Image (cartoon, rainbow, N blue to C red):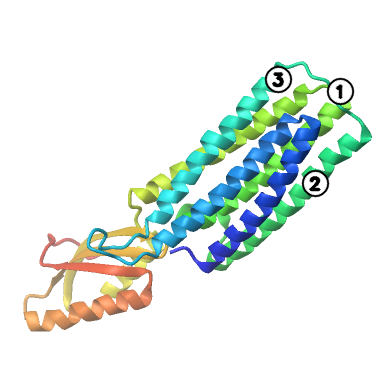
Amino acid sequence: MASGGSKLAIFASIAANLGIAVLKFIASFFTGSSAMLSEGIHSVIDTVNGLLLLLGIKRSKVAPDKDHPFGYGMEVYFWSFIVAIFIFALGGGVALYEGVKHLFEHREIDASPNMKWWNYGVVSGAILFEGASLWVAWKEFRKTHPKGFASALRDSKDAVSIAIIIENGAAVIGLLIAMIGLSLMYYFDNPVFDAISSILIGLLLAFVAFFMAKETRHLLLGEAAVEEDINAIRSVLDTYDEIEYYGNIKTMHLSPNEIMLGAGINFKDELSISDIEPLISEIKERIKHRNPNIKYIFLETNSITKHTRP
């Protein structure tokens, strides 16, 4: 399941995005900036996304029942996928629409000092709030992924933490694009730069949505545990002289912190059923002790063809 750290990062993100969205819409109303409107919509979507991720975490903790004997852990992945759709359809789509619409409109620019500082003030404040939210998310993320973000993207099954980091990072980048667009618009007295920045923000959100959907899709389809976890399983099995050979190790993540394991084991012929049963129980306990995330273990005996022991 998603950790308490993930929930803390989500709450920080929701609080920041909700306040920033209000400021952005006020600035957009008074200035007519399409980039500011796109950023306001972006913040609203990020707020809704945070609520959806919280829903996913809550749903993932529902106890197993007859219809779902392995629990509801994959709810986290489902709602993370919905978040990706929201970012693409609403965030990227609306930002692109607003940018293209304003690109072909001929409108006057209010370059009065008050209007300029209103725009710059809102964007600067939003960058500070989003940066603080990103810092909280990154700090919590590092507690469970000390190896770094690149390795976490490759190995982590915690879709919620990844989504929060990517969303907040995209928000900061989008605000910087909006700041540059506003500066160029005022400097050249040309609103086309504001429209272009809105289009760039839309493309950024579309890319983020595609990346998140791609990563979450693998988890929804049942992604295997990382090689490090599989090697740990092998290291336990290798300690038993009673095992003649084993193989067909298969794993699947049921949630970020729940793994299902299946394997075939052939014990030596001289062992009786009464000898094998306690061995199987011991093997399961040792594997779970080695990796507490492995919640379900299914071991088949005399079910694989002999081959070189891995």
Mark before the other along the chain sequence, 1 or 3: 3
Q: Residues within 10 Å of mark 3 (few under 14, many from 20)?
A: some
206 vs 299, left or right, is right
Confirm whether residue 221 shows in the render. Answer: yes
* Residue nearest the viewer, comparing 240 with 66: 66
User: Which residue is tagged 1?
Assistant: 189
Q: Position of residue 190 (x, y in %)?
A: 82, 21
Task: Give x and y (percent) for residue 274.
Answer: 9, 83
Q: Which residue is mark 2?
A: 124
Q: Earlier in the sequence, mark 2 or mark 3?
A: 3
Q: Which mark is residue 206?
A: none
In terms of sequence position, does the residue under pointer 2 or pointer 1 come before the other?
A: 2
**x and y, in percent, of residue 89 in the image:** 52, 34
- Identify the residue under disc 3: 103
Task: Identify the amino acid type marked 3.
Answer: Leu
Give the amino acid type for the residue marked by disc 2 in the picture: Ser
Q: Say left or right for 101 vs 108.
A: left
Disc 2 from disc 3: Cα separation: 24 Å
Check disc 1: other Cα within 10 Å, few if <14, some if 14-19, many if 20+: some
40 or 233: nearer the eye? 40
| Disc 1/disc 3 C-alpha distance (Å) | 14 Å
Q: Residue at x 75, y 48 (%)?
A: 127
Relative to 36, 166 lies left or right: left
Query: Height in image: 26 above or below 305?
Result: above
The type of residue carrying mark 1 is: Asp
Q: How many marks?
A: 3
The C terminus lies in which quarter of the figure?
bottom left
Vertical arrangement, residue 268 with respect to residue 130, above or below: below
Horizontal and vertical percent for residue 187?
A: 88, 28
